[in-house]
Image: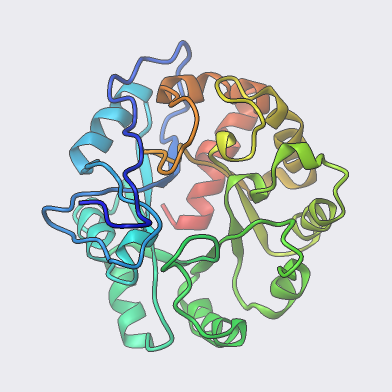
Amino acid sequence: MPIPNAPYCQPPDRNTLTPSFKLPKNACDTHVHIFDSTKYAYQENRSYTPHECNLEDLAKMHTRLGVERAVLIQASVHGIDNSAVLESCRNDLTKKRCVIAVDKSINESQIESFHEKGARGIRLNLVDKGGMPFESIDQVYELSKILLNYDWHIEFLIHVDDPEIKLKAISENIHVPIVLGHFGYMKTEKTISNEKFQEFLDVLENGNCWVKLTGPYRISSQTGIPYNDVTPFAKEIINKNSDNVIWGSDWPHVMLKHEMPNDAELIEILPNWLPTEELRKKVLVDNPSRLYGF
């Protein structure tokens, strides 16, 4: 049930269409969430209340799209209770991985256990309530020394244009790769020439930074498909370092304020960003295989 200050999101379009072209074998969706409140309760300190979107719903959607692999991302509504993603992942480790949320109490024995269940990184959400369980970035740096032993990464949900975010310093002081979602999560109206966006591109080119092509509707000034104003951002990111770019659907598109896209429509715009089969295989198959250890 929703609570004050955590309203219901609109549900995804459950009638997933079939895309007009075939994705490469072992295509990976690196950014999905699952919500099944009958099994996994939501924390009260949250920004939204999602509709039920369970593992079976996810499988149906991916089957229609031709996606064979998935990375389940811990949602902020679950805090640091990772039961939903770990239990959904551990019985299908050939095709699933997960990224979890932890706090400063985490120890190496727990990380080893989570690794065996399919976890390959932690997520720090600096945007939504309940997503940042650490007291300081220095604590994150210390944790990254342990994560390095397991080839994990740290995924940050941040706005790269936030003046409080020192991305270059983070990339230089952290001991594992960092992954940023939603093209860097800066509104397109601020343009590619934005100083902080250019700093982000430099970090992508020269550092241990990865970027997810996820949720174009989260940065677009347009209210629906095809989000043409996102294409220059995607191309700029890919041109900087295509080896460190991955794709995700962002299903079930929580907190979307505009028109809900059909997930097949999100597939249809991929050629705008990835115009060749070689590039699509790289971003959809090869790169996620390296990052998540498929």
- x 40%, y 57%: residue: 47
- x 65%, y 33%: residue: 220
Decide which of 99, 190 is in the foreground and name it. 190
- Where residue 243 appears, x then y in whole percent? 67, 47
Residue 247 appears left or right of 103: right
Using the rendered view, name the quadrant where residue 275 is placed: top right
Is 136 above or below relative to 170? below
Is 254 above or below relative to 207? above
Residue 173 appears left or right of 112: right
Using the rendered view, name the quadrant where residue 66 is placed: top left
Decide which of 224, 276 is in the foreground and name it. 224
- Where residue 46 appears, x then y in whole percent? 36, 62
- x 49%, y 84%: residue: 146
Residue 143 appears left or right of 271: left
- x 74%, y 42%: residue: 237
Is 205 above or below relative to 146? above
* Residue 275 visible, this orientation: no
Decide which of 28, 124 is in the foreground and name it. 124
